[in-house]
Amino acid sequence: MSEKNRIGEKVRTIRESRKLTIEDVSERTNLSAEGIERIEKGELIPGLTPLIKIARVLGVRLGTFMDDQEDLGPVLVRSKDSENQNSVTRFSERNNAASSDLDFYTLAQNKADRHMDPFVIEVFPPSHEEVKLSTHEGEEFIYVLDGEIEVMYGKDVYELSAGDSIYYDSIVAHHLHARGDKSAKILAVVYTPA
């Protein structure tokens, strides 16, 4: 089992502060109560789509699950700190995933009242499991820093290399992974409406 996913405790804390049960959240998101419980315990690495659904039910931004405390001023991230292993958040679009498909390093952690969530993301090659496309409200901007990625968007597939970018509506079914057998690194800016 990989290290516990640190988002789970934040989800549980916010859910409890809203006086909602796991069953309440399950009913409002159409996610299984067992899946939500496993996310909260850090046993399951969630996908972005379920986390965005949970965030909407709890009335918070997706980035809130990664924040420690909010700062009203600018948030500065030095290059030496941007990929600190303590700030990594892992995601997977596979069922019952215990390993990560995407490691997110937030670049705006603790910025209060933000409308965008910028990340540097380590993108791993696809597993042998069937790729699942995700959909959620909002927009995404992806800029490839290193390596190559493949973006599945609706019925189209885009291959991007270092220096390439793509901007798309997240409501269209999409998925991205590294091409070949090497990891890639991207800058991603995700906007989800409140």
Image (cartoon, rainbow, N blue to C red):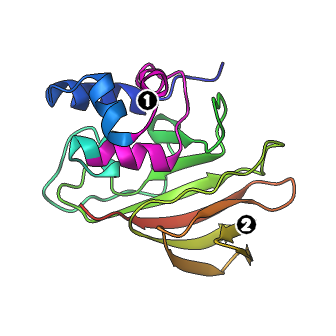
34 part of magenta stretch = yes
Question: In this view of the protein, can residue 82 be seen by the observer?
Answer: no
- Say which of 117 and 139 sits in front: 139
Residue 6: image tag: 1
Residue sitting at x 31%, y 33%? 25
Residue sitting at x 66%, y 80%? 163
Looking at the picture, how far across and down is residue 73, in whole percent? 15, 60
Looking at the picture, how far across and down is residue 33, in whole percent? 42, 24
Sequence-wise first label, 2 or 1? 1
Over which residues does the magenta segment extend?
30-56
Q: Is residue 6 above or below residue 185?
A: above
How many numbered marks appear? 2
Main secondary-structure element of the magenta-colored stretch: helix
Q: Residues within 10 Å of mark 2 (few under 14, many from 20)?
A: many
Q: Is residue 13 left or right of residue 94?
A: left
The kind of residue on which mark 2 rests is Ile
Residue 186: image tag: none
Q: Is residue 62 left or right of residue 127?
A: left
14 part of magenta stretch = no
Q: Is residue 51 above or below residue 24?
A: below
The kind of residue on which mark 1 rests is Arg
Residue that numbered label 2 is attached to: 149
